Amino acid sequence: MRHAPAATRPGALVEEATALLAAPALVVVAGGPGSGRSTVLTQLGAAFRGPVFAGGGLAMLQAVPAFALARAVRVRLPAGDPALLAEAVRSRVRGGLLLLDDLQWADPATLSALPAIAAHCRVAVALRTPHRLPAAAAQALRAGAAGWLAVPPLPAADAADLARRVAPGLDPAAVTAVVARAGGVPLAVETLARHAASRGTADMAEDAAQVEYAVAAALADLTRPARTAMAALGLLGRPATAAVLGAGVEELIEAGLVVTAGEELAPVSPYLAEVAAGLLDAPGRQALHRRLASLVPPREAARHLAAAGDGPAAYQVAVAAAGRVATAGERAELLLLACDLPGADPGPEVRVAAASAALACGRPRAAVRALTGGPPLGVDAAVLRAEALLQVGEVAAARDAAAPVPDGAARDVVAARDRILLLARLAEDPAQAPAAAARITGRHGDPPPHAGLRAALAAVRAHARADGWEYALASATAAAGAAGDLLAARWSAWLLVETLAADGRLAEAAQAAGSAAQACAADLAYSWQTRFLAAELWCVALRGAATDDVVRRAGDLTDRTLPALARGYATAAASLVEADGGLLAPARARLSAVAAPGALLDWVGREAAWLDGQPDLALRPAHADLARAGALVAGLHEITARWASSDLGLSPPPGEAAVDRAAAVAATLKAWTAAGGFDRAAAAWHDLAVREEVRCLLAQGLHESDPTLAVPPLLAAERLAEQAGLVVLLGRARRALRRHAVRRDQRGPRAGTDLTDRERDVLRLVAAGEPTRRIAGQLGISGETVETHIRSGMRKLGARTRTEAAARLGQLA
């Protein structure tokens, strides 16, 4: 008997079944609930050249003899005699194809007749696993089958395609989430896609009921231990060992509902496991949570006890576990859980510890929540709450919370109070901040022993760009780390990154952000980590390096729940790269998804509009927070306004009276004012941002009427734009060259060494015969991006078709 390998694709499964049915034979198509067994039978029938007789069992009519066969041949059958039954069916089917669905609900007469029918006819049946067929009947079925083909999970690309067909409006992040949760089960993919699109409408309730029915019917055929093990996987939300899941694991493996992952077992579809858990009644679910709490690590046990309704026990476990974990992230999670448990009465020390851990992990709102309400907690908690309010952005509330702390409090508390008051002064009245810093230095020393206060004094120096401000912030970061003050260390590192980026020192900012992100990752400080990662991506995107990687990594970030600051940087990075690469629709979609864009996203939106040929949209009134965005972004805003005004034939907008512009920005705006000097401005951007270097070269060419002066910078702009993948600016450069009768051979053959890794990946898949849709699914990019890479590869390889480009790449290998 032929068994299909686990990796067989559904299309290949139909081909294999068709080959096995070239002569009379029995083929069994087996799979779990919602796996697509019926679809395979339907495709088999469609591919068969001859009459097809389709029938099958029904759950409510399993007791009716020969019902599954009678549905197929549509006549009354002699169910009492197996030999006569087989002959009656054979005489009807003859050279046709007999298809029987849902064999798990077939009656005994049908099951006993199948081997005899298959001796003379082509028979294909679908059998759901698990099932309750008698052992003898199942053994006879296996013995008589020419092939036992297991329906494999849908590949990720096919599952994504199915999700898009069911819900065409889903964004890529939602499609990715659906595919991951469904685990390759088609019914789960369809249900989750509709749910994501409808967000809980009445239609969705019907879909969910359909899935629940399918899963419940399948689980009903399992033993109780196996059903409990499947529900346990749903409650855990992760793979688990057999010791945790209990008896019944082997039954789940045999039914194809779980797969092994090392020493652990994981559900084929996490969604089906969740449905299995949801089918438990309330007492059963609580009992399972209690059992799991005794088997899993304390960090998880506390949540299971809370879900079981045992708040006091969950509180004790969470607090005890918080004292033993190694990372700030785990400590914050456990202590915040303890503070939020219904029925628990967290003590003052637990609330303060929870707020402190939350701040160290970048969760200031959770810190405020932990310290709000209940009896007074003392001056330590007051200062901590003020710090949390400051991190949230509520400066006035932070100042008011810290001001009552007396000078007679402990030295560290007074230093923490002065830190908050100094940072509040810096935010509300920057001109007075240096004087306040001098008074604080006189009181606490220079540098002060308190790491947080030292970081605040460095922030004042950084704001004024006083000599050595970089060293002041870097040393404050190191001192805070050495003292174990994680909040001060991360806050100082973040301020260093933002200040460097604001001044246009993008390479240094990216390096500092990458190092800080690694340190945060080791401590599970997710909120801080994502901030640093997103800022690094923004710096890399603006510099014009590794643009494919920027979009991929930014997409990975924005697929998650992010702090608003991190989401803004990641969205800005991906949108700018996409807009520069000619993917203007995806860029607009990303930008429009942000409810309240800050000054950075506002500039990226203006830039995308200008690139899209809508310069009027780039001349909207300036963003209210533009002055706080930093010299670089404010300068880029002015440069984009200059380009937009030039395109519309308008007078240039009045410039900002800024004295702290980045040198490259100042050189560019000076060139626009003087209508010359763009070559010097381009040189200033050379190691900073390639897109702005290209724009300066383009402006130089456009402002020159003499071809001998205009063409060289335009050729340089063309070369740089093509190398960096700046599709829109490349088009502008070539249009300008055509005005001077310079027509570039865009398809000249090249060595292929300047192909990007992503272009090579795409062209290799083209060579393998994959269509754009499947390439997009396999690489996790949009179809439009695939086409862009193909066109770029065609240009670089001198090919006139995608097939020719793929062939030339093969010749280079």
Image: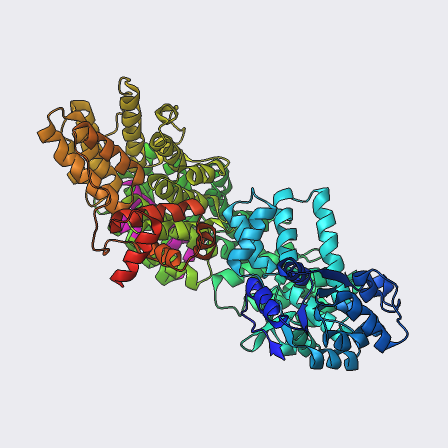
Q: Say how many tags the image has.
A: 0
Q: Residue furthest left?
A: 708
Q: Residue furthest right?
A: 80
**Relative to 341, is 785 above or below?**
above
Q: Quadrant of the N terminus?
A: bottom right
Residue appearing at x 26%, y 25% in the figure: 657
**Relative to 344, is 415 above or below?**
above
Residue in front for this viewpoint, 101 or 631: 101
Task: From the top left corner, tell me how far across and down residue 715 is, in percent.
Answer: 16, 38
- Give the magenta-colored segment's residue range: 484-510
Residue appearing at x 50%, y 43% in the figure: 389
Look at the image and name its color scheme: rainbow
Task: From the top left corner, tell me how far across and down residue 374 is, in percent.
Answer: 64, 49
State which quadrant residue 242 falls in: bottom right
Residue in front for this viewpoint, 251 or 645: 251
Residue in front for this viewpoint, 727 or 576: 727
- Horizontally, is 808 left or right of 364 in the view? left
Magenta segment, principal secondary structure? helix
Q: Say whether residue 165 is magenta.
A: no
Q: Is residue 279 visible?
A: no
Q: Is residue 178 visible?
A: yes
Q: Say whether residue 490 is magenta.
A: yes
- Horizontally, is 661 left or right of 402 in the view? left
**Relative to 431, is 532 above or below?**
below
Residue in front for this viewpoint, 163 or 265: 163
- Horizontally, is 482 left or right of 88 in the view? left
Task: From the top left corner, tell me how far across and down residue 304 is, in percent.
Answer: 67, 65
Residue appearing at x 47%, y 43% in the figure: 564
Task: From the top left corner, tell me how far across and down residue 320 is, in percent.
Answer: 59, 68
Q: Quadrant of the C terminus?
A: bottom left
